[in-house]
Amino acid sequence: MMDNKGIGVGLMGLGVIGGQVAGVMLERKRLLAEQAGCPVILRKIKVIEPDLSKPQLDEIGRQLFTTDEDEFFATPDMDIVIELIGNENPALAYQRRALSAGKHVVTANKEVIAKHGVDLIALARRNGAGLHYEAAVGGGIPLIAPFQRDLLANEVKGISAIINGTTNYILTSMSREGTDFISALKQAQKLGYAETDPKNDIEGIDAAYKIAILASLAFQSQIKPDDVYCEGISKLTSRDFRYASELGFAIKLLAIAKQYDSSVEVRVHPVFIPQNYFLAKVDGVYNAVMVEGDLVGKVTFIGKGAGPLPTSSAVIADVVSAAREITSGVGCVAAWEPKAGKKIKPMSEIETRFYIRMNIADRAGVLAEIAGVLGDNDISIASAIQKEADELSKTAEIVIMTHPAKEKAVQQALAQLEELEVVKEVNNSIRVEE
Ligand code: HSE
């Protein structure tokens, strides 16, 4: 209920996002009070020991800081806890502790939400609190709220999304400048887009967490990160980009979720998409999420998917929403219910076209052998190009585009091709989304 003391907020984590959120909360006090209907007051900030030397602490006010978890949670009149620590632990324990105490939680933590969101929502409900995570997917792009509200009358047929800015930046550099993967990654790290340990981004794990969250909301069914087939971008080379361009395609890391009558498919992997598709033109660190609903048709959300300013926009909006819920006494906005998940379609049953690049012996009869393996696996060739015969080693490079084929058949055929004496190497195979 409305309290003349205002709404108290505790912040956990003072990294780039946490620092930005604290700054905006202090600078825009008046706006937040107007939006929330009462003052929104930052009462405590939990940091780790080394953070105490940050000059930022003086600007914010040193009396607000603590390194002690118990002291943080004992702060009087703290209604909302913002968790911006990231990763699973100890963030999960902090969120549980806050919700168990009836405090609303606002977070940007996609790993915790993707892995434990259903349990946390149930915990929040039992304690009359709310869990808000708009910033967990797509930074400042409104995604969670539209799925929870504006799109809810729809049967969502599918989502196709670029939801990792780091990989989109790397792929854009490789495509535009012809750079190899390692140089593009180093450049992204130099510019602060990629982390020192880039594994979660480049292996598609970050995108898998995000599509698990979106698909759970869209299909009203719990999709766990382990349900998401996940393949990263580190095997892509500048040659793949050259062929893609020649064939009229762009290469993107797409997160894809599709709903069928009795099952759903959820996957993250590099794809060839036609150059004239909207998602093919989303470059650099931008994210874009295309949703298809049976009533609304196709809608696309696009914007900056990361960074302190866009992320703070989503975090602060969640703080105001939580404050409104507290002051109005209206419970938290419904998120996905903890109900049994829909059947996940195994990757082996997915059907797509494929791009296959191989190094082969350059002599008579080789193509017939390769075509034989594909044919035996019921894979039909749509086109083939052969290039750059190496006189010395008597090898050539061949690129085959297939017609749609079952994943299981393609993987079996690739394994058999590797065994052929005439195939020196299967360099890459990339699915095509059309
Ligand atoms: N590492 C993420 C990205 C940003 O590159 O998109 C935070 O979700």
Image (spheres, helix red, strand yellow):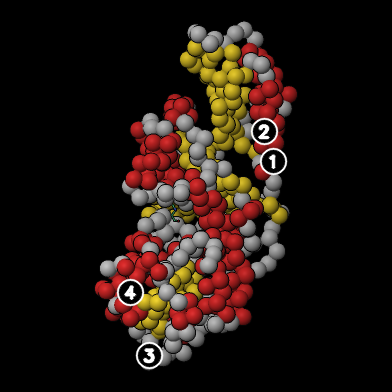
| SS state under label 2 | helix
Q: Are marks 4 and 2 in contact (CB under 8 Å)?
A: no
Q: Are marks 2 and 1 in contact (CB under 8 Å)?
A: yes
Residue closest to the eye, 356 or 380: 356
| Residue 226: x %, y % from top left | 64, 53
The residue type indicated by label 3 comes to Lys
> Disc 3 marks which residue?
5
Q: CA distance from mark 1 to mark 4?
A: 49 Å
> Which mark is in front, 1 or 4?
4
Which is more N-terminal, label 3 or label 1?
A: 3
Count of numbered marks: 4
| Residue 136: x %, y % from top left | 48, 62
| Residue 17: x %, y % from top left | 38, 63
Q: CA distance from mark 4 to mark 2?
A: 52 Å
> Disc 4 marks which residue?
25
Q: What residue is rendered at 38% in x and 41% in y? A: 186
Residue closest to the eye, 220 or 64: 64
> Disc 2 marks which residue?
411
| SS state under label 4 | helix
Q: CA distance from mark 1 to mark 3?
A: 58 Å
